[in-house]
Image (tube, rainbow, N blue to C red):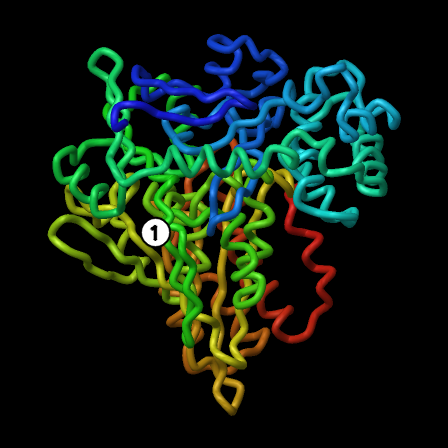
Amino acid sequence: MNDSIRFILNGEDISLSTLRPTETLLDFLRLNRHLTGTKEGCAEGDCGACTVLVGRLIDGGLHYESVNACIRFVGSLHATHVVTVEHLAAKDGTLHPVQQAMVDCHGSQCGFCTPGFVMSLYGLWLTTENPSRAQIEKALQGNLCRCTGYEPIVKAAEQVSQTRPSALFDPLEKTRADIIARLWAMQGGDTITTTSGEDRVIVPGSVAALAQVLADEPKATVVAGSTDVGLWVTKQMRKLDPAVFINHLTDLQKITLEDTGLTIGAGVTYSQAFAAMAEKIPAIASLINRIGGEQVRNMGTIGGNIANGSPIGDTPPPMIALGATVKLRSVAGTRKLPLEDFFIDYGKQDRNPGEFVESIFVPYPPEGADFAVYKISKRRDEDISALCGAFHLALDAAGNVADIRIAFGGMAGTPKRARTVEAELIGKPWTETTVTAARTAFDADYTPLTDWRATAEYRQLTAKNLLIRFYLETAGAPQELKRFEVLA
């Protein structure tokens, strides 16, 4: 079948041949299937009240991830298993251990956010035995509660990790083999097209098919993780016609570790990239931990963050500072260019009609070099950057600056190098006197704007101070300086 989106909802096979590109999973669950345990709070992927699990086949295994149903489109669900809170309890009403722990530890008050917390904890319970406090808090970054203060919810997570009943009790463990077989049967190499009036949903069967689709439909909206496109729909009521969903294309989800750097497929999510980054470029892994909540990191892709071209995207500054290159593809072939040259102006990238981002190559910091990334936001977790700065420094044997690359997001209409500051530092001794003198050069590189996240004056001063901070840390200042990342 090449005219239907097919997936499993709890235990039921779903096939949709008529589908609006903008239909969210949340609306489908509540309005179409009357599964009202999944709540709408923010409709922008912040509060976690709409959290569900989505299972997909990766390397032959079935992996479940927490996602925000409010910004996940139904068109992205082909050959997946969607699990809602209604699926957890036994048929006789016996609560799942995760649910029972929430009761025992008084983890719920008004109850509105509770299903989302349960699903996030359930996702953690499925994947991690005896999670640490840090792992629990990370799993709950994307869930907000106004009532409990979180401590009872954390205690519930700790309680349920201590006693794990037979896998045959769990609704996903006891049906895993069956679900895998059913999802395999849904997969295929054909491109799927569904219509609803004049609207179309297109699910390419391969990366080559994606190139052909975009050659035929150069104005189509490509949707990977939908963590930004979802808000175009829920907040701006924009149309997506046609919408081309690519989150199922495993050829775009590969990470290749090479001698000099990593090649990251455009469809690699933040969660998928974390382990490789933690091993090879830890500063970027730390940044990933502060991008959205777990649900956003499970959906959002590095390629999408770059292709979207937002001036406050978090991944471009560190990748530009490391000298990353981007590979673009179309039916005409592929081409590569430095990532910093990909961003031309606000909302404009060096991408020809029909081209899409296929991969990004990120060099490792050379041995002996210093590399740091600083995300400045009003709230430490699950917040958009006011600005994000990245610094890459190499000194010669005499302690002079042999090379330095400084890149910022949130300071201009695109992610941008501080070339004047770099020129002020090259060839000079890496000292506090040199660095302090170079601070004034930021005024020649950036003219930031004032918005509700920060004033222009604040951004400019902060960028200058981050250069000082980077110097102090390279000079051996204590890491406690990191506590000042959050705005007052």
Q: Residue at x 38, y 26 (%)?
A: 6
Give the amino acid type for the residue marked by disc 1 in the picture.
Asp
Q: Which residue is drawn at 31% across and 38% down?
A: 188
Q: Is 280 displayed left or right of 163 in the figure?
A: left
Q: Which residue is drawn at 60% across and 33% down?
A: 175
Q: Quadrant of residue 74?
A: top left
Pointer 1: residues within 10 angstroms few (<14), some, or many (20+)? Answer: some
- Residue 389 % position (x, y): 50, 55
Q: Is 225 displayed left or right of 155 in the figure?
A: left
Q: In the depicted view, which residue is nearer to us: 172 or 351?
A: 172
- Residue 65 % position (x, y): 56, 38
Q: In the depicted view, which residue is nearer to us: 4 or 224?
A: 4
Helix, strand or loop under label 1: helix
- Residue 134 % position (x, y): 74, 48
Q: Is 84 displayed left or right of 235 in the figure?
A: right
Q: Quadrant of residue 76?
A: top left
User: Which residue matches tag 1?
Assistant: 251
Q: Report if residue 50 is visible in the image.
A: yes
- In the displayed structure, 187 sits above or below 268; it is above
Q: Report if residue 235 is visible in the image.
A: no
- Residue 485 % position (x, y): 64, 50
- In the displayed structure, 474 sits above or below 328; it is below
Q: Residue at x 32, y 58 (%)?
A: 339
Q: In which quarter of the image is residue 404?
A: bottom left
Q: Is 116 displayed left or right of 385 in the figure?
A: right
Q: Which residue is outermost to the bottom?
A: 397
Q: Which quarter of the rendering shows the C terminus?
A: top right
Q: Which quarter of the rendering shows the N terminus?
A: top left
